[in-house]
Image (cartoon, rainbow, N blue to C red):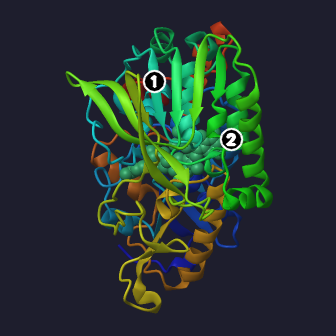
Amino acid sequence: MTEQSAADRPLRIAIVGAGPAGIYAADALMKSDAEVSIDLFERMPAPFGLIRYGVAPDHPRIKGIITALHKVLDKPQVRLLGNIDYGTDITLDDLRTFYDAVIFSTGANADRALGIPGIGLDGSYGAADFVSWYDGHPDVPRTWPLDAEKVAVLGVGNVALDVARVLAKTGDELLPTEIPPNVYAGLKANKALEVHVFGRRGPAQAKFTPLELRELDHSPTIEVIVDPEDIDYDEGSEAARRHSKQVDMIANTLEQWAIRDVGNRPHKLFLHFFESPAEILGEDGRVVGLRTERTQLDGTGNVKGTGNVKGTGTFKEWDVQAVYRAVGYLSQNLTNLPFDDQAGTVPNEAGRVIGDENADGADRYVPATYVTGWIKRGPVGLIGHTKGDANETVACLLDDSANFTPAERPELDAVTEFLESKGIPFTTWQGWYRLDAHERSLGEPEGRERVKVVEREDMLRASEPHKV
Ligand SMILES: Cc1cc2nc3c(=O)[nH]c(=O)nc-3n(C[C@H](O)[C@H](O)[C@H](O)COP(=O)(O)OP(=O)(O)OC[C@H]3O[C@@H](n4cnc5c(N)ncnc54)[C@H](O)[C@@H]3O)c2cc1C
């Protein structure tokens, strides 16, 4: 095999992870002056990452971002190679054989741990697992136990509110969305009448967005309840309200809810502040309650990070039969790449993967290896934020490109022949169009935009692997 200089042909780039970050990276590469040829690897048979398997089904406008991302994947310079797991089906050495550079955009799909007793009890769940279930992820069980009448959700970010809202809504409210039949059946049998959301800190420190908060109140079946005792600010919190419109909007909404009369919608959703989860209580291995410690503001005024409150030594027990932890997502370690367990990211500077942090200049970095999205900066921020990430990472890649060691086998067929020789049924972009059409046709008789296909085998059958 003759080595071609990268200057004689388009730059061959592999992007691993076809969530928004990976797709925006492809877009940034194609919008640059460089001539590029991109393969986007994805472990799922379908692309779009957490837009498909994280964003709540009753957020169709956000799910609609997929339509904008279509324009990127429709371009001839990019191919989708789905149903391929980096680390199992393809290694870093393989990628180096076929590509001049690699960008990892593998996101985050696990729950961050919460170190309190009782986490292992039946009825104690991670939000990521529940989200994967209601969003029809093929790799989680098909049924979800929804037999608790009173449920706790720990955390006050957007994911916590998604989980609380889905638990508090009726199955019929969610039926017009894309939820698959097993999820509708599960939600229809849901016994939850009370959902209690717990934040360790106060209204000015809540991490959800004003839009997500106000949406809770739009359901005809959910009564949102805030205890006036939980409305408290220190000087720093007041300063945060003055400086951030978003913090102020959240505080205003919560204040209004705290003083209004409680209505009679059947499902109650309580938003509790200054209650720090101390222990999940169990009996015979099952959740029977939650113990929280009352906290108070410590006056530091720190609205970001974890500080700002201290325990008061006053504990309270809540009668709940299920507890959902929504305290953050966590990225997975990637084979043959460095990983910062604490931050849950691949160590990097502006997207360049750091191989030796004591070295200077180019020696500091793993050659031609980059990260973007949640694996780059941790699992925070909205879909839109991954665009800026991608632009920064791609700018670094293009700056470095003159020094890349050219791939040994840059031809388009080389990698697909390799995958075929390993018997991997990979899906393509055209395959997504087939799956998309199939899901839409499933929804049509019921007047729904789509009904999601859950089983991996069924997704593959509809996508028709290998076929372009
Ligand atoms: C529950 C939840 C709800 C959210 N709701 C909203 C919302 O309403 N609005 C909003 O703007 N943002 C929302 N977000 C945030 C948004 O989803 C993220 O900002 C965004 O998805 C991060 O993009 P990413 O591409 O870095 O990661 P991801 O979206 O996680 O994409 C990573 C991709 O990499 C693939 N991958 C992982 N490992 C491998 C591997 N080894 N080999 C091959 N492929 C691999 C994954 O399958 C996935 O497709 C939500 C997040 C969560 C968790």
Residue 462 shown left or right of residue 96 in the figure: right
Q: Quadrant of residue 272?
A: top right
Q: Is residue 164 visible?
A: yes
Residue 274 shown left or right of residue 321 in the figure: right
Inspect the image, locate mark 2, and give the three-letter code of the amino acid beneath it: Ile
> Which quadrant does the N terminus fall into?
bottom left
> Measured along the vertical axis of the image, is residue 104 above or below residue 166?
below
> Measured along the vertical axis of the image, is residue 81 above or below residue 133?
below
What label sits on residue 151 in the rendered view? 1
Query: 453 or 312: which is nearer to us?
Result: 312
Inspect the image, locate mark 1, and give the three-letter code of the amino acid beneath it: Val
SS assignment at label 2: helix
Q: Is residue 426 visible?
A: no
Residue 145 shown left or right of residue 237 in the figure: left
> Measured along the vertical axis of the image, is residue 400 above or below residue 453?
below
Disc 2: residue Cβ within 8 A of ligand 1's nearest atom: yes
**Residue at mark 1 to residue at mark 2: CA–CA distance:** 32 Å
Q: Position of residue 187 (x, y in %)?
A: 49, 14
Residue at the (50%, 29%) spot, across then down: 135
Q: Are marks 1 and 2 in contact (CB under 8 Å)?
A: no
SS assignment at label 1: strand
Residue matched to label 2: 65
**Residue found at the very far left of the displayed protein:** 284
Q: Residues within 10 Å of mark 2 (few under 14, many from 20)?
A: some
Disc nearest the viewer among 1 and 2: 1
Q: Position of residue 335 (x, y in %)?
A: 30, 60
The numbered mark, 1 or 2, whose residue comes first in the sequence reads 2
Residue at the (70%, 18%) spot, across then down: 262
Residue 422 shown left or right of residue 85 in the figure: left
